[in-house]
Amino acid sequence: MRLLVVEDEPDLLVLMSRALERGGFAVDGAPDLAQADLHLGLASYDALILDLNLPDGDGLSLLRRLRARGSRLPILVLTARDALEDRVIGLDAGADDYLVKPFHTVELIARIRALLRRPDAVLGVVLELGNLVLETTTRQASVAGVDISLSVREMALLEQLLRRQGNVVPREMLEAGLYSFDSEIGSNAMEVLVHRLRRKLADSRASVCLHTVRGVGYLLADAR
Ligand code: CA
């Protein structure tokens, strides 16, 4: 899951980005509307976190533009304390939720997860294949009822593969969901990650097979 965070206070942007990355999201940050537009044109995001008071304009203008062109991107608006009017206008303009500053990052992550599991989002809460189950809300994977321990990145990779199970997922698509623009991705980082995940799945006797489709990407399928 890849998120765009638009926030002009550098410390807050870093704080949110780090917390969200620990929560398993790939995060790009933008300090203003111009950068936000640039990112939205370059990458595909699963949700947007949008501060309203930005140096080059009002976040609401971006929100309205996205909705006007039919975008259903889940959007969480950040507003200043007591700015009730902002909240109402934000929701009217098509925001899915709002958070009042200052907030705790735990709350931010909980709200984003809630947005991503709304029925009209294309996301399920529990993903299953064979005897493998991934609870996307608690970030816990299990095989035949026994929890398995995965790193944040392994979990994110498994989630992407499970969401497109039975289909070859292009490597570029996986990388886009796992790494933000700022990440340093070594040329074999994906191979190493896939190798580790494959080994953990095998060790826990998951009845799934993680295939490499050379030159294209990866495929997770039922092995039974
Ligand atoms: Ca601001």
Image (tube, grey):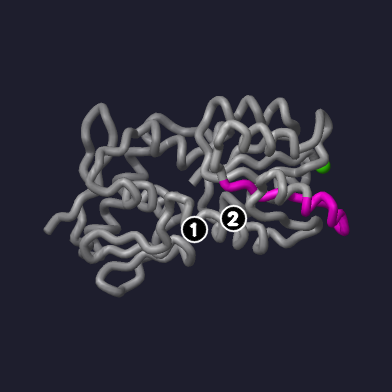
Q: Is residue 77 magenta?
A: yes
Q: Quadrant of residue 41?
A: top right
Q: Secondary structure at mark 1?
A: loop
172, 91: nearer the viewer = 91
Residue for point 64% across, 49% down: 18
> How many angstroms separate mark 2 from mark 1 (CA)?
9 Å
Q: Position of residue 80 (x, y in %)?
A: 84, 52
85, 179: nearer the viewer = 85
Q: Position of residue 3 (x, y in %)?
A: 57, 43
Residue for point 74% across, 34% down: 61
Identify the residue under disc 2: 112
2 in relation to 125, above or below: above
Quarter of the image for the C terminus: give it: bottom left
User: Local crowd at mark 1 within 10 Å, few (<14), some, or many (≥20)?
Assistant: some
| Amino acid bearing label 1 | Arg
Identify the residue under disc 1: 117
Q: Which residues are magenta?
A: 74-88
69 in relation to 19, above or below: above
Q: Quadrant of residue 193?
A: top left
| Amino acid bearing label 2 | Ile
Q: Earlier in the sequence, mark 2 or mark 1?
A: 2
